[in-house]
Amino acid sequence: MEKERENQILSVRDRIDDIDDQILSMLNERLHCAKEIGRLKSVEKRAKWDPLRERQIYDRLLEKNQGIFPKDALKSIFHEVITTCRLSQKNTVVAFLGPEATFSHLAGVKYFGHSAEYKPAETIDDVFAEIEKGRSEYGIVPVENSIEGAVFSTLDCFMKYKVQICGEVRLKISHNLVCRSGDMSDIQTVASHAQPLAQCREWLRNHLPDIPTLPVFSTGAAALMAANNPNIGAVASSLAIKTYELQVVVKGIEDYRGNTTRFLVIGKKSPSVSGRDRTSLLIGLMDRPGALNEILTVLSEEDINLAKIESRPIKGKQWKYLFFLDMLGHMENKNIRRGCDRLNSLCSYFELLGSYPQGDSSTDL
């Protein structure tokens, strides 16, 4: 009986090997087809990325799957396949707030897959400069957190650099306290980016009340410091643990569950309509009573869903502000186009930051 079961296992394993060979063959064929599409689009000077087509692929596969293969795993597998095939049409360089293993790096991998070339930058300003000067095709920057709110350095960069928003990605983020030894008693300083430190302030106050915190420009930089100094602990990502060979002291030290960060993908040109889009604007209001109410009235009359509004002071102009608006829909939608035309006539300053596909549901990191 035991030998019979062993033979059955071997038979099934042989079948799995055959299936794997078929999958590999189909992947190579799909890659070849993607390159051919890229060649044909180049001849016609058409955009390589078609968000609507990609969304239709996911929808078709999920419907055809009928829930047999786990939904999230299926999307993850085909996301890697689709992005790899798309990026094969052209080498893609993605700038992110470095060094390696920051949450910006993880967001980039989630959005572009592992086939893109990732280029770390020291500051968010540097990421924007990479795009504006054409040294990188895309950049990825944090724009808001569900607990701490807007990332003002990112919003301010939209006022300084001429770039377009091309996409967004949302991540549920879990923070880990790490160090070289894994022993909390070795930690004399806790380093991280200011946002993670703020998101973990109660835990740090309760468990390390006498240990000072040190804000640095990224979680990856903090992890690198911890790797080089046995007395520094870092609040960092799960990827940082592997990248810098650190030990976990405590997992999940964030003060609130459901901690989610939204990242924006920036580039030179926004993509075409996907059917589930968001449009972002940067506007200045006329100096008159009711100016903001006029803007909100236009959005209401055009049946436009306002997803976000955030004000930022204009540098060098005391008590003057610009407003960031996020609307649901694409510039190619008639109501969004009409609404933007009306806003342009009412505003002292109007800039379209981009229309782009909305991000998928969050994944834990």
Image (cartoon, rainbow, N blue to C red):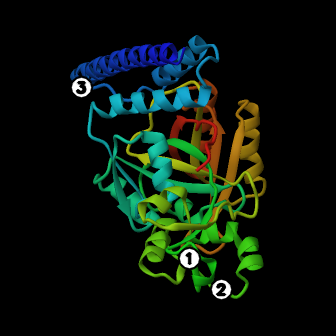
Which residue is depicted at the point 73% across and 84% down?
A: 209
Residue 286 appears in the picture as rendered: no
In this rendered view, identify the residue nearer to me: 89 or 302: 89
Gap in angstroms between the C-alphas marked 1 and 2: 10 Å
Which residue is depicted at the point 52% across and 37% down?
A: 355
Is 44 displayed left or right of 197 in the figure? left
Amino acid type assigned to the residue bearing label 3 in the image: Ser
Is 46 displayed left or right of 297 in the figure? left
Q: Earlier in the sequence, mark 3 or mark 2?
A: 3
- The residue carrying mark 3 is 42
Q: Residues within 10 Å of mark 2 (few under 14, many from 20)?
A: some
Q: Position of residue 292 (x, y in %)?
A: 74, 52
Q: Earlier in the sequence, mark 1 or mark 3?
A: 3
Occupied quadrant, residue 224: bottom left
Contact? badges 1 and 2 (CB < 8 Å): yes
In this rendered view, identify the residue nearer to me: 187 or 94: 187
Gap in angstroms between the C-alphas marked 1 and 3: 50 Å
- The residue carrying mark 1 is 233
- The residue carrying mark 2 is 211
Q: What quarter of the picture does the N terminus occupy? A: top right
- SS at mark 3 in the image: helix
Occupied quadrant, residue 228: bottom left
